[in-house]
Amino acid sequence: MEIGPFYSREELLAFGFTKVGSPTWVSRKSSFYAIHGSIGDHVRVDDFCILKGHLEIGSYVHIAAFCSLSGVAGVVAMGNCSSIGNRVSIFTGSDDFRANSLNSNLVPQEMVSTISGDVRIGIAAMVSAHSVILPGVSVGDAAAVGAQCLLSHSIEAGTVLVSGAARCIPVGKRDVAKILELAAKVMPNSGPGALSEKA
């Protein structure tokens, strides 16, 4: 039996989806981890996408190449007729970058501080290439998010959003000594000085 470029409905159900519509065109070059949720009708997922956790994908949805949808700490819901461009990343969980904690899934979880929340992409909404959507964000119905936008807050239906001048702005300081102390507890044979020298 010849295997085509797209996963069959049965294969997608075997990954953990409870409902898969028809037709679907989900590239075999995409990867799936700990999946549950559903896929509607007329859905296309292009090459090299990574899909994880709880995903509720509506009908007539296009997920372009190299996208990452992480529904591990919440639900990623994509409304009917929505689309996301190349290399869009959607997170339902993120490290808290202002916290005085470590930031790896491999260290004890009591040393980690995270932010989590569901993400919703509304009906007929579009998110352009290289954009990042953080936990708890809702993109309203028919909204349009331009390339390279970082969404940390929800936007209303019909909003058109574009990225501004690229600048990195300091917004605070982390407690370096405390964080290195936590790291030293994870790596007991390396003090903070040794960790700094390796960095």
Image (cartoon, rainbow, N blue to C red):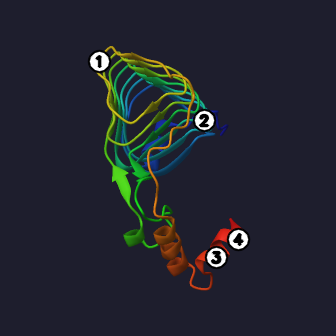
- Under mark 4, the amino acid is Glu
Where is 21 relative to 105, above or below? above
- Which residue position is annotated with label 2? 66
* In-front residue for pair 16/82: 82
Is residue 131 visible in this depiction of the protein?
A: yes
- Which residue position is annotated with label 4? 197
Total residue callouts? 4
- Residue 171 location, x and y as percent? 44, 44
Q: Secondary structure at mark 3?
A: helix
Is residue 60 visible in this depiction of the protein?
A: no
Q: Closer to the observer: label 4 or label 2?
A: 4
Marks 2 and 3, how far apart at CA? 38 Å
- Under mark 1, the amino acid is Ala
Q: Quadrant of the C terminus?
A: bottom right
Q: Residues within 10 Å of mark 4 (few under 14, many from 20)?
A: few
Do callouts 4 and 2 mark residues in contact (Cβ within 8 Å)?
no
Q: Closer to the observer: label 2 or label 3?
A: 3
The circle drawn on residue 193 is 3
- Which residue position is annotated with label 1? 157
Q: Earlier in the sequence, mark 4 or mark 1?
A: 1
- Residue 9 location, x and y as percent? 46, 37
Occupied quadrant, residue 158: top left
